[in-house]
Image (cartoon, rainbow, N blue to C red):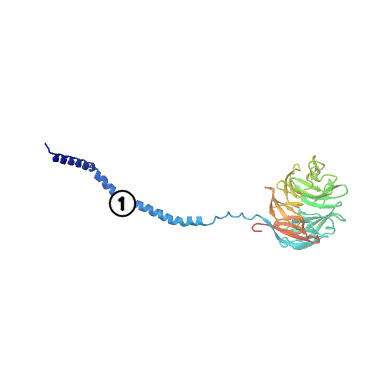
Amino acid sequence: MMDNDQLTEARLRLALDREVAKHQLSPGAWPQLERRLRRQPRRRAAIAAGCAVIVAATAVVAPYLWHRLSSPVASPPHPPPGPHLVIGARAHVSGLSLTAGYGAVWIIGPGVIYRVDPATAKTVATVPTPGTGGQPSGIATGAGAVWATRPGRHPGAYRIDPRTNHVTSFIRLPPVPTAITVAHGRVWVSVAKEGPGIVVRIDPRANRVNGSPIRVGFGPGEIVSAAGTLWVTNTSGGGPLVSRINPATGAVIGARGGQWGGTDRLGNAKVTRIDATGAGSLWTTDVNVVQRVDPANGHVTAAIPVPHAWHVIFWHGLAWALTGVAPSGLGTVVGIDPASNRVAVHGAPVRGAPMAITAGPDGLWVVFANPSHTSLELVHLVLASGPS
């Protein structure tokens, strides 16, 4: 039998063997341990490389981020200034009625017609036309000539050759010829007389009146060609305020009543005159508004607020309205965009009242009367962009 000391020693050895067995490696453990030890340097190198990349990227991006964060927020860029009218030239004149054509501006003066150079606004020729200028005279270009009415004694119409600046014909007309226009191969002249007025037709090839007089309303004035029709504004009461003429037949369409002129059943004023045509519409003015009119029925399709507006023409895709004289004593011209029916272009203010306007290839020509109405000035307004 084993004594107590031997028994205790055996127990201790057994416990020690068990602990050693727990920590002994399996036969395949050493290769795995060797592979792990070989991979450790590569892992450390990869981690070090990744850290280096992060540090380098931070060094590049950090100044940019700091600049963006420290810089003030930039305001959005201002839109470029829109188009506007600027004064190109100006000169004193002695007439109100004017037109443009054949490389010049033509103005009716007292017994003469002035030819004005568009580049300088200076008079380059004076054509004697006795009897013009004393009463309202009309002037127009077309059919190879400049045409002007003589409303006084021996009434008629002058034909001027723009190549020679000489009168080539004088066509006798009934009293009192006023407005004149060239359209549909004819020269059309409105004639005011006692009772209803008339419109006469001149054949420019024969230089004589062609066809019977066309009866319109009282005091016929401006004639506008649009939508295959001639529109005549009658300035006196006692009849239609707008007459429509078929240029092919000379027949008057809806001259009495209808949608044109007078008032409707509610007492609202209808269109009383036609100034211009463009963008599929007729254009005119009323109290502080520019009216856009449907040529099919005379209905006002838009009323654009324009203080002191009194006359309008159409040029360069816009309707241009004279604004009269503001309380400041300044007058100007504004352009209305037909796409939005809003004022899109403002003109340079001029001291005085705008009295007449015409359009040429490179701008608008406006006659202004000074505040005392003792002198007239011709101003060339050019469409420009950029700072005004």
Q: Amino acid at mark 1?
A: Pro
Residue 209 in view in this figure:
no
Circle 1 packing at 10 Å, graded few (<14), some (14-19), many (20+), is few
Report the side of 77 relative to 259 (left or right).
left
Q: Nearer the viewer, residue 281 or 176?
A: 281
Residue that protrudes farthest toward the top in the picture: 1
Residue 377 in view in this figure:
yes
What residue is shown at x 45% (from left), y 56% (from top)? 62
Q: x%, y% of residue 45?
A: 33, 52
Q: Quadrant of the C terminus?
A: bottom right
Q: x%, y% of residue 292?
A: 73, 46
Report the side of 18 relative to 41 (left or right).
left
What residue is shown at x 29% (from left), y 47% (from top)? 36
Mark 1, secondary structure of its residue: helix
Q: x%, y% of residue 259?
A: 78, 41
**Circle 1 residue:** 41
Q: x%, y% of residue 82?
A: 65, 54
